[in-house]
Image (spheres, rainbow, N blue to C red):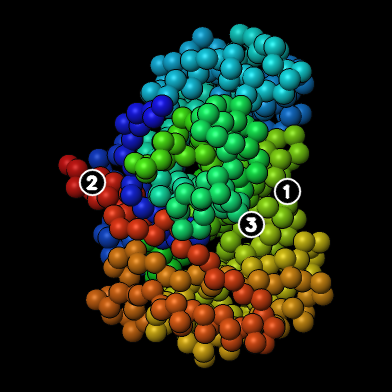
Amino acid sequence: MRRSPAPLFFLATLRHASCFGFQGAVSRRERASSKLLGSLDAAERGAITIDPPEQNTQTTALSMTIEQLEQVLGGWGRARLAWDCYSNGVDPHFLFGPSGNDLASPFSSWNEYADKSSLKQSVLPTPRVTQPLGNGALSLLSELHSHCGGRIENGLATLVHISTASDGTTKLLLRLVDGFEVETVLIPFWASGHPKNEGGESSDETPWNDDSDKRTSLGRATRYASLGRTTVCISSQVGCKQGCTFCATGRMGKLRSLTSDEILVQLFYAKKIVRLSRDGILDSGNPDDDSLVLPPVTNIVFMGMGEPADNAKSVRNAIEIMTRRELFQLGSNRVTVSTVAPTPEAFMEFCESKCVLAWSVHAVRDDLRKKLVPTTKYTMEELRQGLIDTLNKRNLRTVMIEVALIADVNDSLREANELADFVRYITMEVPGSKLICNLIPYNDIGGGTSNDGNAGNRYRKPSIGRVLSFQRRLQEVGVYSHVRGTRGDEESAACGQLATSRKKKIELVG
């Protein structure tokens, strides 16, 4: 039976999965936000940096290990039970407490907490299904989270919008305690022969035994693990001060950095969305499909809003929690941190972190790179040496080099040859390194300036021929390269346009 969609604001499209077009929303909480933002022209230059003095940095359970939470709750079993919930996108405040059916969020109409017995069966290991989390432990959790309404869900962050493209790419807009908002994107990669293929169409070779198998919870659960994988694109800041001229977030300026808890709550909600889709209660946004079933979350990429190196401590702490076996259980090679490298030391910030490093290069010629990343203060050779020094101190020496290809700006064979020479030097200087060049065709985010500095000439997506020629030249000289596919590339709204419209609303108030 087809379920009525929740009253959400669904977008018809999302753009490129790498999230270069991300743009955050500014809080409606402050009517004077236009004064904080200053002129839009200044924001486009990345000149604005706002860190509200009242920003709360208190810790929540999300950034605690089992041992740390055990000290708060007075028992290992309680801490373990709480983390069984958090790692599945469930707030124990609602699962074990008396409330839950009155949630003021898009999930309230789906009655997620209405059948708590079934939810426990779904998210808790069999030995702990009947274990209670009593009023004492819940009170302690509420005290721990007193700065965010006593809970994680609808406290530390609230899901205010969800939008789904026809290929399953799903974008979340989360509102934080202080009213600022960040975007998180779930990018499914479907296994061959399963409900979605690369084009976003239903596959003829269905994984379901029959229609009844597709509709039942048991049928979904037994097929779930073979669907493929979902990558979650995480934000580390509200806005960004690096000012990349091809990136919508760069035009916001930096409004503030996220705490490690605010980074981790994005994964919390991503796990919730995937679980709800598995249970058949997430609308696909496609009138031809009853519901969307997303594959399990297996990968994290810090490629959303913000520059991770400008918020390195919070990002490192979040990675530690993500990769703990008893917490979010992600492998070190499944978490990728992408940095534009504001300084040569930026890479060293993540030397000990359990993650893959990615460098947003975009151009290796200093003059061109300066036009694309105007905040660049170091030569590319100086930045490259910083990467080399870091890789030589790491056990995990995989590195991704990212290039957003823009028509007639950095997509010629000249730039391909320069990039090839530049990255081959890295492999020569770092024994055992594995280097991958990700080529990312530009997606129009509106109002970008061109290479000649004329704001009236927008950047354009390169032709597929130019992209493939660029890739072939790299491969001819032994540099492995991959063309990043565009996800959810339809009409309506690109990734980040929801935030743009909300930002404009705020600036016009008052």
Q: Are marks 2 and 3 in contact (CB under 8 Å)?
A: no
Residue 391 horizontal/vertical position (percent): 75, 68
Identity of the residue drawn at 34% across and 78% down: 450
- Binning the other alpha carbons within 10 Å of mark 1 as few (below 14), some (14 to 19) or many (20 upward) gives some
Q: Estimate the spatial distance between the alpha carbons at disc 3 and disc 1, rounded to whole Å.
A: 11 Å
Residue 78 horizontal/vertical position (percent): 71, 18
Disc 3 marks which amino acid? Thr
Q: Residue 258, which numbered label?
A: none
Q: Estimate the spatial distance between the alpha carbons at disc 1 and disc 2, rounded to whole Å.
A: 41 Å
Q: Nearer the viewer, residue 286 or 269?
A: 286
Disc 1 marks which amino acid? Gly
Q: Residue 505, which numbered label?
A: 2
Residue 137 horizontal/vertical position (percent): 65, 14
Which residue is labeled 3 in the image?
336
- Binning the other alpha carbons within 10 Å of mark 3 as few (below 14), some (14 to 19) or many (20 upward) gives many
Res. 130 visible in picture: yes
Q: Secondary structure under badge 3?
A: strand
Q: Nearer the viewer, residue 471 or 347?
A: 471
Which residue is labeled 1 in the image?
331
Disc 2 marks which amino acid? Lys
Res. 278 visible in picture: no
Disc with the residue nearer the chain's start (2 vs 3):
3
